[in-house]
Image (spheres, helix red, strand yellow):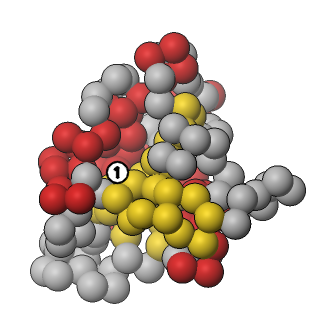
Amino acid sequence: MSTACGGAPATSVTPETTAAQTSSADAPAAGAADSPAARCLAAAEAARPRRADEPAKISVKHILVRHAGADRADGATRTREEACLRALEARDKVRGGADFDALVSEYSDEAGAASRAGSLGAIERADVLPPFADAAFELDRNQLSDVVETKYGFHLILRTE
């Protein structure tokens, strides 16, 4: 399991593409400012440009990892850094071939997420917060985002349609 958060582009969730996905940011940390948590937070906050060919609606699933201080944290006690690293751990498991739906049950802190496999159904850009929309709408079908931060915590997004 990688403990660094690469700012790598989103990856397609297939055995052919998940194993080879790496980034220079996945290298060991050189110091505290370049710690795994710092790299994870930087990648989660990264700006994502809009696609010129963006569809009006897409269907997505997601994993939400909450932290103390996030909106609707529901008693979460982990720090922001711990939450980012936990989301990163889930991302790495998906990239390694783990089943996304099973990881929703294990990692997502969103009430009811497991019963719907993390599905948000069909969404339009205006239905979700801008950082989530920016990450989700850049994805191709069956592609997984990197870790994304919103006011609710850290997300992994899988575009399904």
The reply to whether residue 147 is visible in this rendering is: no
Which quarter shows the N terminus? top left
Up-down relation of residue 94 to residue 59 (above or below): above
Percent from the top left, x then y, of residue 135?
60, 58
Of 56 and 28, nearer the camera is 56
Percent from the top left, x then y, of residue 59?
50, 57
For image coordinates 39% across by 55% down, the residue present is 61
Of 33 and 126, nearer the camera is 126
Residue 55 in which image quadrant: bottom right
For image coordinates 63% across by 42% down, the residue present is 140
Asked which secondary structure carries label 1, the reply is helix
Report the residue marked by disc 1: 87
Percent from the top left, x then y, of residue 10?
59, 41
Q: Is residue 93 left or right of residue 132?
A: left
For image coordinates 68% across by 52% down, the residue present is 138
Q: Tell me the kind of residue under disc 1.
A: Ala
Percent from the top left, x then y, of residue 89?
31, 40
Q: Is residue 161 left or right of residue 155?
A: right
Up-down relation of residue 118 to residue 133 (above or below): above
Residue 151 in which image quadrant: bottom left
Label 1 CA crowd tier, 10 Å (few <14, some 14–19, many 20+): many
Q: Is residue 49 left or right of residue 88?
A: right
For image coordinates 36% across by 33% down, the residue present is 94
